[in-house]
Amino acid sequence: MFDLFVIGVADNMLSKANKATLALCSHVFATQRLQNIISDLPIEMHNISPVTETVATIKDLLNSGNVAVLASGDPLFYGIGKKFLLEFPAKNIHFYPGLSSVQRACALFKTNWDDATILSLHGRNNQHIPGLILPHAKCILLTDATNNPTEICKNILDYLLLIKATNRASDITVMVAENIGLTDQRLFSGSLTDASRETFSPLNILLIQTPYADQTNYPASFGLTEEEVVHSRGLITKSEVRAATIHQLRLPQTGVLWDVGAGSGSISIEAARSHPELTIFAIEHKQEELANIKANIRKFGCYNIIPVFGKAPDCLAPLPAPDRIFIGGSSGTLPALTEIASRLLPVNGRIVINGVIEKTITEAPKLLAGFNFITTSTTIHVTRTDSSMQTVPFNPITITTGSR
């Protein structure tokens, strides 16, 4: 087997060393744009797309000679290099990186990038994008046709309106570098509103600065007190029960959680703080409680929570399928909710139902077992003793878990 040379290109130029490397190869794979910069070289050229077919062709060609691939920037930075490392022996691959698009964009904007969170949004069409961006003071984004700068900024504005935090929009700065190194290169800098009205080239790097992102008195951790969470008239899941509930949910790092009958949103807030890449829908039909959820999102910076006004199951149809479901209140709709869970939860999915009244405590395990969930129930009795040795008992809570 001969060798594969993967060369990163910046500014549509190749160095003398890179041209010397190409001279060792009989075939080169590149986009049409990159083929144009080597049109004078005596080498057989191939389109790099579709990648699956390209990999198969390269494997065949490597039996008879060296092969080169031209890629934009650094092939190992969200590039094709990762794919090649999975397909070819490392000893037969040689990488020659160019400057990455992120490096070049930050140089153009005269800003450092060592303190930035860098995200690729390619293919993240079902994720709550504002929740990935807003927690970070500086976020650099590789966009795609769906998650383009215009739509991203619109989504952030819509989300800030939803959680009643539109006053924070004016603090956010948006920068877009388009067509870097090409004749129609353009740099944009402005507000979310400005960017939401622009049209940008598909070749872009998006930088969003959110100065208030780190300005919270509640750094991410597990174990908020009831006093810290905004709630109404004591209507909040007690911290001991909260801890047990989160434990039973066994939350994934990414995915979707439905918090049905979210109340103040205390379960959602704890889940959001411990799993920042999880998308959480806090579903509540009481306006007062929905206002509390929004206040807690703002207070704790849990922008991966989406508050949903409505009564389940009627409001659930538009939501993405859940990986986990928590039911803190069902208002008599538990049979319908467990049926939906049986249809939508994936393999290894889990549903957790907290019950105070006898009907929920007895009905939940029967319903889940009827839908072939592996079911367990745990009853928690909480009694607190203060510094004066006075004891305060609370109503017992039964946590019913259904797993697959």
Image (cartoon, helix red, strand yellow):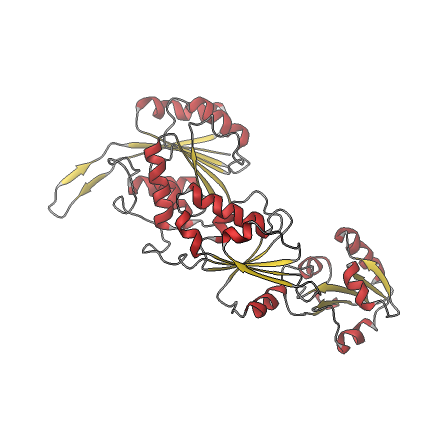
Across and down, in percent, residue 95 comes to 70, 69
Q: Is residue 365 left or right of residue 141?
A: left
Q: At x 40% / y 47%, what residue is drawn?
A: 165
Placement of 263 over or under 201, stated as above or below = above
Q: Which residue is nearer to you in this view: 28 or 176?
A: 176
Q: Residue furthest bottom?
A: 16
Q: At x 37% / y 48%, what residue is drawn?
A: 298
Q: Is residue 33 left or right of residue 390?
A: right
Q: Quadrant of residue 87?
A: bottom right
Whether residue 253 appears in this view of the structure is no
How many numbered marks, from 0 up?
Answer: 0
Placement of 157 over or under 212, stated as above or below = above
Q: Which residue is nearer to you in this view: 14 or 48?
A: 14
Q: In the picture, which quadrant includes the N terminus?
A: bottom right
Q: Which residue is nearer to you in this view: 112 or 222?
A: 112
Across and down, in percent, residue 147 comes to 59, 48
Q: Residue furthest left?
A: 388
Whether residue 12 appears in this view of the structure is yes
